[in-house]
Amino acid sequence: MFDSIKKMFSAEDEPVNTTGKPDISREKSAELYAKAQTYFPGGVNSPVRAFKSVYGTPLFIQKGDGSHIWDADGNEFIDFCCSWGPLILGHNNAKVREKVIEVMQNGMSFGAPTALENELAELILKNNKFIEKIRFVSSGTEAVMSAIRLARGYTKRDKILKFEGCYHGHADALLVKAGSGLVTFGETSSAGVPKSVADETIVVALNDKEALAKAFEEFKDQIAAVIIEPVPANNGLLLQEKEYLQYLRDICTQNGTMLIFDEVISGFRVGFEGAAGYYQIKPDIITYGKIIGGGMPVGAYGSSAAIMSNISPEGSVYQAGTLSGNPVAMGAGIAQLSELLRIGFYRDLNNKTEEFVEAIQRFATARNYKFKVFGIGSIFWFAFTDKEYIRKAEDIDASSMEKFKKFHRELLNRGIYLGPSGYEVGFISSAHTKIDLEKTKRAIFDSLDLVFNGK
Ligand SMILES: *Cc1c(COP(=O)(O)O)cnc(C)c1O
């Protein structure tokens, strides 16, 4: 069996076989992946799923329940990817599932308003003091794209400013990375993005007040919006200090620039009010995605009633969607967010995560491993570093990703599923039990020993 598996990997993936045991079987997944490659570019419908930064073939998932998932070969894992964040209640949560089934009995889409949209909006707006009106869309990308158009329409300015190391989905204006220099026009980070679009996007480093001040000086009265992940969690976990975020808030206010918090990950994750609530900083526009749809495709953006009145059909900023506010997706969102509003939900989830993070850090520190676990709310990130903090993208050591690759493989072999890249964070759900986390810690300890000592 081992030989047949070995054949499926390229020479560079030749098993290091640190454990002396064969890797888990991926025969069925490999078959499905081969077929998928004939249908989809790279065999996937979203690039990171192709396992390009880790060892082996992507696992094709057959089912999930609570904190566990099963792949096509019948391997069982404790899942810390959780669909990249949406599944804060774990897989196949009964309340969410039952609500979806109930709504589906009456049809799946009407292209006309339903009471369910009101219900989800009310759940959110009643429990979030940072926005007064909301508009539902179908993905995080769409939410961000619309928020930017709103900011441009409202301020009648064209430029936007983003930060190196923050991800905001795949809209053209945001597929832009820093060039060289303190304040730069972006360079496109994807083919197909016109230079003229990238020229409207300014990119600066996170945690750098000087760069920010310089950008506002250089582009005085031109910047419509600054967009930031207040909890940057798409390129490692680059936790910012509150004082920096407050500085950002103030400089935007002074310059008539809208501050957009992209809370597609942090919204409903670090607390029901997301990062705005966590830091008690009020942005002008907030975008949501992931958790808001309970595992269904939902995004949203919200702001004050006055600013939202610029959106069509009330105002002149056009934005629409055939499946926006889809009843089934609204149902999933309603069921999931209702659970999050239970007293103690976040306290318990966040405490559980903090204990997990601290136990792993204690182990690594005791052994002098160059390894840090960063965490906030129920998000964690494993970094092969000895830096005390990593607050900007350039502080991540790209060569450390080799260690992550081994680590990821050892964890899969021990029944632990992490997102397939060292730049991705992990998520803990309310479905993760004490036993799950104990088992995971042991697997992590063993895997770290192997990664650092090769035994
Ligand atoms: C995931 C994510 C997006 C994109 O959302 P999609 O639903 O994948 O389009 C945008 N911004 C942030 C911060 C995200 O984490």
Image (tube, rainbow, N blue to C red):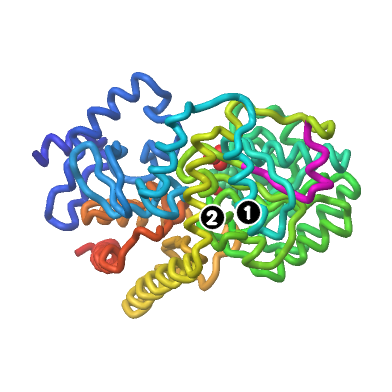
Quadrant of residue 210 within the rendered picture: bottom right
The percent coordinates of residue 314 (x first, y second) are: 82, 34
Q: Position of residue 87 (x, y in %)?
A: 43, 50
Q: Which mark is residue 233?
A: 2
Instruction: Specify whether 159 is left or right of 168.
Output: right
Q: Position of residue 225 (x, y in %)?
A: 78, 47
Give the residues in magenta. Answer: 300-312
Q: In the rendered view, would you say 311 is above or below 19?
A: above
Q: Amino acid at mark 2?
A: Ala
Quadrant of the displayed image that contains ligand 1:
top right
Q: Depth check: give the residue in front, 321 or 19.
A: 321
Q: Mark 2 touching mark 1, by CB under 8 A? A: yes
Q: Is residue 308 magenta?
A: yes
Label 2 beta carbon within 8 A of ligand 1 = yes
Q: Which residue is mark 1?
A: 229
- Disc 2: CA contacts within 10 A as few (<14), some (14-19) or many (>=20): many
Q: Is mark 1 within 8 Å of ligand 1?
A: yes
Q: Which mark is residue 8?
A: none
Looking at the rendered structure, the secondary structure element under dot 2 is: loop
Q: Quick check: 46 above or below 438?
A: above
| Residue 246 shown left or right of residue 82 in the figure | right
Is 19 rendered above or below residue 333? below
